[in-house]
Amino acid sequence: QVQLVESGGGLVQAGGSLRLSCAASGRTFMLYAMGWFRQAPGKEREFVSAISWDGTNTYYTDSVKGRFTISRDGAKTTYLQMNSLKPEDTAVYYCAAAKTYQTTALAPESLYEYWGQGTQVTVSS
């Protein structure tokens, strides 16, 4: 029902910035909460950020608060602006969509039905 494609990853030096994009298509995708998750080599996938279906509520894992900003626009794209990047931010970043009107408790991976292919973010020291 929803197709997601991430872009914007790449190699950046510590302290630099990247902006990830998630292009969504399919039926009623604007009614979905959107989340960003990441998975570093040898580690489990973890929650990074989420935004409610209406764009009014945003959430961040503690390690990225104050550095990352999630947003979405009418062009059906979800963004993750990443500033002050650290080497520990290195991971494959995934966009995901959850069919929910919830505006809270958006961190659990189990809420998300649709996933993008991922985009690599590498932060060098």
Image (tube, rainbow, N blue to C red):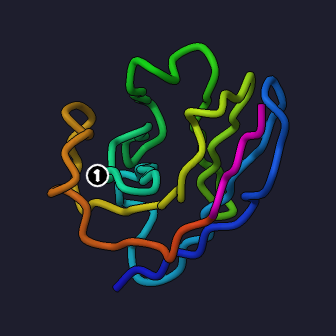
**Quadrant of the frame with the N terminus:** bottom left
Dot 1 crowding, Cα within 10 Å, few <14, some 14–19, many 20+? few
SS class, disc 1: loop
Q: Is the magenta stretch mostly helix, strand or loop?
A: strand
Q: In the picture shown, does residue 81 fall above or below 29? A: above
Side (left or right) of 111 relative to 91 = left
The residue positioned 65% from the left and 33% from the top of the image is 87
The residue positioned 39% from the left and 73% from the top of the image is 28
Name the residue furthest left.
Answer: 110
Q: Mark 1 highlights which residue?
A: 44
The residue positioned 36% from the left and 56% from the top of the image is 42
Q: In the picture shown, does residue 50 fall above or below 101? A: above
Numbered range of the magenta stretch: 120-125
Q: In the picture shown, does residue 23 fall above or below 122? A: below
Inspect the image, locate mark 1, and give the three-letter code of the amino acid beneath it: Glu
Q: Where is residue 124 in the image (x, y as percent from the top left)?
A: 77, 39
**Quadrant of the frame with the C terminus:** top right
Q: Where is residue 116 in the image (x, y as percent from the top left)?
A: 47, 73
Q: Does the magenta stretch include residue 35?
A: no
Q: Nearer the viewer, residue 66 or 92?
A: 92
Side (left or right) of 52 relative to 125 = left
Q: Which of 26 and 87 is in front in this view?
A: 87
Q: In the picture shown, does residue 17 fall above or below 44? A: above
Splitting the image into 4 quarters, where does residue 23 fall? bottom right
The residue positioned 61% from the left and 28% from the top of the image is 68
